[in-house]
Amino acid sequence: MHGALRAVGLGAAAGRRPTVFEAATGLPVVETYGMTEAASQITANPLGGGRRPGSVGRPVGAEVRVVDPAGRLCRAGETGQVQIRGRGVISTYATETGNERFLAGANELFRAADVAES
């Protein structure tokens, strides 16, 4: 059907109860995560299947990891800091005092201020 709404996008974070909206409207909610520093979208739940309601989905064009305070990868179900790397990810911010780097050391992953469950 031309022009028909197929899905609803939810950006920035996972929704608390997307299934309630889906049941009421019949439209799937595609949850995504993104930020300006990564040229917008970083992860997305697939529209065609394999979606996990309450999750921001899989990486889209970027490497994403969740690490503990010591920089070690979190195990499934653990919460930690989001780090990303990819062609669209910035390496520095221009500030009044000069360029400020926001990378996670030698491995060159951007340290987001966001926290996620691995």
Image (cartoon, helix red, strand yellow):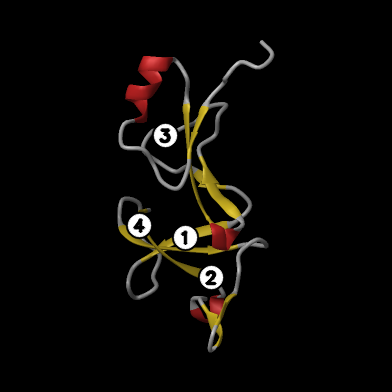
Classify 52 as above or below 114: above
Label disc, if present, on residue 75 of the rendered structure: 4
Query: Label 3: which residue?
Result: 52
Measured from the top left, where is residue 90 in percent x and y? 60, 69
Q: Amino acid at mark 4?
A: Arg
Image quarter of the N terminus: top right
Image quadrant in which you'd find residue 15 = top left
Q: Amino acid at mark 2?
A: Leu
Q: Earlier in the sequence, mark 4 or mark 3?
A: 3
80 horizontally vs 51: left or right? left
- Mark 4, Cα crowd under 10 Å, few <14 / some 14-19 / many 20+, is few
- Mark 2, Cα crowd under 10 Å, few <14 / some 14-19 / many 20+, is many
Query: Mark 4, mark 3: which one is toward the viewer?
Result: 3
Query: Label 2: which residue?
Result: 109
Q: CA distance from mark 1 to mark 2?
A: 9 Å
Measured from the top left, where is residue 43 in percent x and y? 52, 47
Instruction: Say what secondary structure mark 4 lies in.
Output: loop
Tag 2–tag 4 contact (CB < 8 Å): no
Q: CA distance from mark 1 to mark 4?
A: 10 Å
